[in-house]
Image (tube, rainbow, N blue to C red):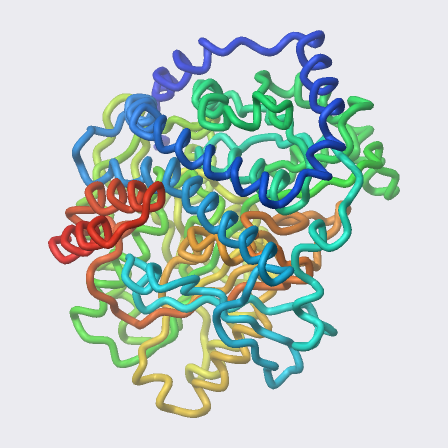
C-alpha cells in the first residue's frame, strides 16, 4: 500500500518563493543590456582590481551569513541549534566563502607567478595520464574536517607534466572578448548558484545574469547584497522566474552562453526544445540552441563496498558514512549515495545492511521541501513495494526508503536508471569469486547500468589492500570508473567541498547524451583539461566528520568553519578543533 504523503510539506518554501515574483521581460531585457554594456570592461579588468572585488565580496557575504542560514532553517523545517543546522552553514555561506578565499589566492598567484600554483606533487601515472595533488590546498586544510583526505586531479590523456601549467587560467593568458553568461541556478544546495556565478566571473571573465530557481528564489536579495560590489559595477544581476523566464533568457540575443545546474530533461528542453519536437530534434542531432552550454545534472551514485575483514566498529562507522550520503539535505543532492553495491557472498553484507537500517531509524524523517519530491518518492515505493520504509513521518515529511536486494541484471530498474532526488537508496549484490573479480564487475555495473557520470565511491578495508592483487584491482577500478569524481572510503561530496578540485561529469558527455553534464565548475585552480578527481581518505577517521549524522557538534564546527573562511586566524582554527574533538 502506498504511503500517503501530504503535498503541503513544502509550504514554507512556497511562502518564501511567493515573495519573489517573476521578473518582467522588460526588466530581463534591461538586466542583460546593463551587463552587455559592461562585459568588455570586466574582461579587461586588471587582476589586482579583481582581487579587491573579492575582498569586498568576502566581507559582504560574511555579513549576510547568519540571515541566510536562519531563512533556510525555517524553509526546510530544521530546528536551530541542532546538528542538522550544519547542513545550511556548509551548503550555504561556507562553500561561497571558501570559493572566494581560494579564488583570491589563485589570482594573487597569477599576479606573482602567471598562474595558480599547484602546491602538491605532479606525477605521471602508469597509464600515462598526469595527476596533480591539489588537496589539501594549504596548511589550514590539514587541520579541518578534511584531515587525512587527499585529492588529485587527473588530466585528460595527452596532457604532459611539462604542458600542465599552460592549461591553467586560460582567460588570464590571453584576455577573452566580453561575454554575458546566463546561470540557471540550482534550487537544492543554496551555494551552487553563487558558486557557479563566481566561476563564470573569475575563471572565465564573463559577466553574469543569475536566474534564481523558484525553490530558493527567496535568497536572491541576499545574493544581491552579498555580491553588492559586482552589482554596483554592472557585472552581476539577479532575476527571478520559472521555465518561461529561463527559456526567454536562453534565447535572448544578448546572452552569449549558458550554465545550468538541474536535470538532463531541462538541459534537453533548452538545447532541443520541449515535447515531441524536441525529442525528434535530439534524435536527428539538430539542436535549436547553438550557444555554448555547460551543465551539472546529477547522478545515480554508486557506493561500492569491497569485501574484507570488517569488525563490529567498522560496520557502525560506515553505516553512518553511508547514511550521511543519503540523509544530508534530505536527499536532495546530485551527489547523494544512491546504490550500495556489495559482494553477494560476503558474510558482512547483511551486517552492513542491518547497521544501515539501524542508523536510518535513528535519523528523523525530513520535510519533502523540493518540488515533486513526494510524487517521486511514491514512484519508487510503488516500483519496490517490499522496500524498507524507515521512520515515522509527520505531515509533509518523507520516510527513508531502502530498497535492498535488487537484481543487478534488471538494467531497467528505476533505481538504476533515474536519479530519485529524494530520500531513496537502493542496494544490490554481485556474485564474484573474490574481491578482485568483484571490483572488476562492480566497475562494469556502475559504468554500464547506472545512469550518470558525476561521482562514484569505493569503501575498502586496509587489510584487503595488503593483497597486491586487490590493491591493483582498486587502482584499476579508479582508472576505469567513468565518473568525474571517484572517492575512496568517504563521500565524494568532500571533493565538491574542496573547491580546488574541479567538479562535473566525466568529459565523455556531449549535448546528445549529456548524462551528468558538460564542463567543470568550482574550479579554483582554473584547470582547462581536467578529466576526473580522485579523493582518498583513511578507512576510519577521527574526529567524526560534520556531514556524518552521528556528529553531535556538527552545527558548531561548520559555523566556526564559516567564520574562519571569512577571516582566517589561529584562534578560530583552535575553536574549530575544540568543537571537532567533542563531536
Does residue 218 appear in this view?
A: yes
Q: Quick one: 159 or 334, which is closer to the camera?
A: 159
Q: Decide which of 344, 173 is in the foreground and name it.
A: 173
Say whether residue 507 is left or right of residue 261.
right
Q: Which residue is depicted at the point 58% across and 52% down?
A: 504
* Side of 465 where 520 appears, left or right: right
Q: Position of residue 21 (x, y in %)?
A: 53, 9
Q: Is 320 placed left or right of 282 in the picture?
A: left
In the shown orientation, is residue 18 left or right of residue 358? right
* Relative depth, front residue between 136 and 379: 136
Total residue callouts:
0
Query: Considering only vertical position in the picture, is 11 above or below 469?
Result: above
Q: Residue furthest bottom?
A: 468
- Return the x and y of residue 305 as percentages of the image width and height: 38, 69
Residue 137 figure quarter: bottom left
Q: Quadrant of residue 285?
A: top right
Q: The N terminus lies in which quarter of the figure? A: top left
Q: Residue at x 48, y 60 (%)?
A: 407
Q: Position of residue 396 (x, y in %)?
A: 31, 23
Q: Give x and y (percent) for residue 575.
A: 17, 50
Residue at (15, 47) in percent of width and height: 552
Amino acid at each position: 500500500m502506498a504511503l500517503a504523503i501530504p503535498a503541503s510539506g513544502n509550504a514554507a518554501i512556497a511562502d518564501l518563493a511567493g515573495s519573489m515574483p517573476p521578473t518582467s521581460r522588460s526588466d530581463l531585457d534591461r538586466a542583460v543590456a546593463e551587463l552587455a554594456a559592461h562585459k568588455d570592461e570586466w574582461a579587461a579588468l586588471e587582476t589586482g582590481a579583481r582581487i579587491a572585488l573579492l575582498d569586498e565580496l568576502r566581507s559582504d557575504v560574511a555579513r549576510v551569513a547568519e540571515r541566510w542560514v536562519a531563512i533556510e532553517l525555517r524553509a526546510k523545517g530544521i530546528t536551530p541549534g541542532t546538528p542538522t543546522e550544519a547542513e545550511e552553514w556548509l551548503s550555504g555561506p561556507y562553500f561561497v566563502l571558501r570559493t572566494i578565499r581560494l579564488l583570491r589566492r589563485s589570482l594573487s598567484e597569477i599576479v606573482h607567478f602567471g598562474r595558480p600554483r599547484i602546491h602538491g606533487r605532479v606525477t605521471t601515472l602508469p597509464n600515462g595520464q598526469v595527476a596533480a595533488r591539489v588537496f589539501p590546498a594549504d596548511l589550514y586544510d590539514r587541520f579541518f574536517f578534511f584531515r587525512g583526505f587527499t585529492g588529485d586531479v587527473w588530466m585528460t590523456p595527452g596532457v604532459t607534466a611539462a604542458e600542465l601549467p599552460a592549461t591553467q587560467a586560460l582567460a588570464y593568458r590571453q584576455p577573452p572578448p566580453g561575454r554575458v553568461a546566463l546561470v540557471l541556478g540550482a534550487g537544492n544546495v543554496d551555494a551552487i548558484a553563487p558558486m557557479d556565478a563566481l566561476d563564470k566571473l573569475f575563471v572565465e571573465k564573463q559577466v553574469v545574469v543569475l536566474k534564481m530557481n523558484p525553490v530558493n528564489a527567496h535568497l536572491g536579495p541576499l545574493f544581491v547584497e552579498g555580491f553588492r560590489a559586482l552589482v554596483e559595477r554592472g557585472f552581476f544581476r539577479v532575476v527571478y522566474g520559472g521555465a518561461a523566464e529561463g527559456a526567454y533568457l536562453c534565447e535572448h540575443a544578448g546572452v552569449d552562453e549558458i550554465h545550468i545546474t538541474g536535470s538532463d530533461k531541462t538541459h534537453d528542453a533548452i538545447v532541443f526544445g520541449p515535447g515531441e519536437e524536441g525529442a525528434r530534434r535530439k534524435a536527428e542531432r539538430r539542436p535549436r540552441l547553438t550557444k555554448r552550454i555547460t551543465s551539472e545534472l546529477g547522478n545515480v551514485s554508486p557506493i561500492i563496498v569491497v569485501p574484507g575483514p570488517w569488525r563490529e566498529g567498522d560496520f557502525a562507522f560506515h553505516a553512518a558514512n553511508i547514511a550521511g550520503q543519503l540523509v544530508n539535505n534530505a536527499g536532495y543532492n546530485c551527489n547523494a549515495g544512491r546504490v550500495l553495491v556489495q559482494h553477494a557472498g560476503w558474510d558482512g553484507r547483511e551486517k552492513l545492511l542491518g547497521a544501515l537500517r539501524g542508523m536510518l531509524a535513528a535519523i528523523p524523517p525530513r520535510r519533502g521541501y523540493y518540488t515533486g519530491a513526494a510524487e517521486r518518492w511514491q514512484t519508487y515505493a510503488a516500483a519496490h513495494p517490499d522496500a524498507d520504509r524507515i521512520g515515522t513521518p509527520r505531515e509533509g515529511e518523507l520516510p527513508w526508503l531502502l530498497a535492498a536486494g535488487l537484481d543487478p541484471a534488471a538494467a531497467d530498474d528505476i533505481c538504476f536508471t533515474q536519479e530519485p532526488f529524494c530520500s531513496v537508496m537502493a542496494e544490490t549484490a554481485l556474485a564474484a569469486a573474490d574481491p578482485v573479480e568483484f571490483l572488476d564487475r562492480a566497475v562494469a555495473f556502475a559504468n554500464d547500468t547506472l545512469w550518470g557520470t558525476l561521482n562514484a565511491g569505493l569503501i575498502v578495508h586496509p587489510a584487503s589492500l595488503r593483497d597486491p592483487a586487490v590493491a591493483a584491482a582498486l587502482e584499476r577500478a579508479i582508472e576505469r570508473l567513468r565518473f568525474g569524481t571517484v572517492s575512496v572510503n568517504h563521500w565524494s561530496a568532500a571533493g565538491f567541498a574542496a573547491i580546488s578540485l574541479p567538479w562535473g561529469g566525466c568529459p565523455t558527455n556531449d549535448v546528445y547524451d549529456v548524462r551528468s553534464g558538460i564542463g567543470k565548475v568550482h574550479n579554483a585552480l582554473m584547470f582547462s583539461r581536467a578529466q576526473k578527481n580522485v579523493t582518498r581518505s583513511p578507512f576510519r577517521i577521527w574526529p567524526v566528520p560534520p556531514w556524518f549524522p552521528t556528529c553531535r557538534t556538527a552545527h558548531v564546527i561548520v559555523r566556526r568553519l564559516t567564520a574562519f573562511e571569512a577571516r582566517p586566524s589561529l584562534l578560530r582554527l583552535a575553536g574549530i578543533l575544540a568543537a571537532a574533538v567533542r563531536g
